[in-house]
Image: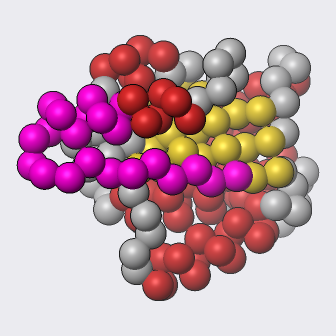
Amino acid sequence: MKLRLIAVGKIREPYIAAALEDFRKRLERYHAFEEVEVAASRGGNAERAMREEGERIARAIVPGEPFWLLDRRGSQLSSVEVSGKLQRLADSGHTRLTLVIAGTYGAEEAIVERAEFIWSLSSLTFLHEWARAIVVEQLYRAAKIARNEPYHY
């Protein structure tokens, strides 16, 4: 399965960039993986930022392709559940999945409504950069679990 991650903003912290690069390389042994960064809106107007970023996200989503939105209002899953959900998607004939991490103020309602699944990493609030690293690590972990390869879980 080809996995795409659309994220608002750039990775600025070198240590997070290094962790992401490590998990990207690990993940690519199991799945084709692509990251798409869309520009974050500037200024403090939450409504405008969500609208602008939502438009950029919408342009990056492939029509007809399933996508999951990362949002604190979503469902929390264990690593085993993430693996099973990805496997069921592949078993149903899907060859691609897009995951979306919105910007500072969250996702525009139009993006929320289009999402096939809304995934919450935790009830904690994370920096967006950390959320990206956690998502990529969990995709890697899910691939290992699906193949019954050892990975602590």
Q: Taking 91 as reference, is 19 left or right?
A: left
Residue 40 position in % (x across, y down): 32, 51
Task: Please name the residue shown 46% across and 48% down the image.
Answer: 38
Kindly identify the residue that appears in the image at 52 percent across and 30 percent down. 59
34 vs 62: above or below: below
Identified at 90% across, 51% down, the residue is: 147
- Where is the C terminus found, in terms of image quarters? bottom right
Q: Quadrant of residue 98?
A: top right
**Compared to 100, does 143 lie above or below?**
below
Magenta span of residues: 34-54
Magenta segment: does it hold 85? no
Magenta segment includes 45: yes
User: Dividing the image into 4 quarters, which one contains the N terminus?
Assistant: top right
Residue 153 to residue 32: above or below: below
The location of residue 96, given as percent across then percent down, is: 77, 33
Q: Is residue 81 above or below residue 12?
A: above
Observer able to see residue 72: no
Residue 113 at x, y percent in the picture: 41, 15
